[in-house]
Image: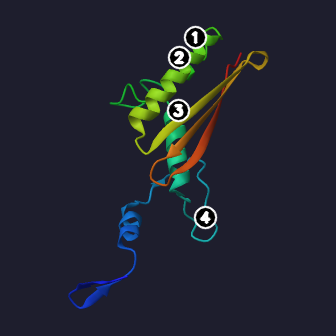
Amino acid sequence: MAGIYTGDKQISGDLEQAKIVSKKKPHRDLDLSLKIHPIRKDIIPLKDDAAIKNAVKNLLISNFYERPFQSDLGANLRGLLFEPAGILTNIQMRDNIRFCVEKYEPRVSVDSIDITDVVDENRYKIEVFFTIKEFSTQDSVEIVLRRLR
């Protein structure tokens, strides 16, 4: 493979692969469990896949009007929690999740959404499967919504 001469340096190797790798940006997010690093005594941040997964989960557990100046941010799943359990509520939850993730998280694409209604325990188990576009990896987020009496 021929190299490229740029001034006093010569670059060799697969330049297309180098361009692809250089486009990937590191993603960081704050871990809400606030785990402390044992040596640095600082909060351990989430990186790359874990940061994106955390962002998706935070979007899904957010309700409308919870965040100032972003009244429509979130999937409003707790707002649907006390609706009558049935197929219509499941469809509305699925639509809210898909719309929320597509609108506010451009780094992922939703593959499928599984919603299980556990009537005896007054809860919904929601699992969202998605693909992280930049890394071409598949991941999932699981959320359990409970009705407390």
Q: Which residue is mark 2?
A: 92
In this image, 65 relative to 148: left or right?
left
Q: Of the residues tagged 4 and 1, which is closer to the observer? A: 1
Q: Is residue 76 visible?
A: no
Secondary element at image label 2:
helix
Looking at the image, which is closer to me, 3 or 121? 3
| Residue occupying the point 41% across, 60% down | 24
Secondary element at image label 4:
loop
Q: Which residue is mark 3?
A: 60
| Location of residue 74 in the rendering, given as x and y in whole percent from the top left corner | 46, 29
- How far apart in space, not on screen, are marks 1 and 2 (Cα)? 6 Å
The circle on residue 37 is 4
| Location of residue 34 in the rendering, given as x and y in whole percent from the top left corner | 58, 52
Q: Which residue is mark 1?
A: 88
Residue type, numbered disc 3: Leu
Looking at the image, which is closer to me, 11 or 126? 11
- How far apart in space, not on screen, are marks 4 and 1 (Cα)? 45 Å
Q: Is residue 139 visible?
A: yes
Looking at the image, which is closer to me, 63 or 93? 93
Q: Earlier in the sequence, mark 4 or mark 1?
A: 4
Among all residues in the image, which is located at the extreme bottom?
A: 8
Is there a contact, CB below 8 Å, between mark 1 and mark 2? yes
Residue type, numbered disc 4: His
- How far apart in space, not on screen, are marks 2 and 3 (Cα)? 13 Å
Q: Of the residues tagged 2 and 4, which is closer to the observer? A: 2
- How far apart in space, not on screen, are marks 2 and 4 (Cα)? 41 Å
Residue type, numbered disc 2: Gln
Among all residues in the image, which is located at the extreme front?
A: 1
Q: Is residue 43 above or below residue 133?
A: below
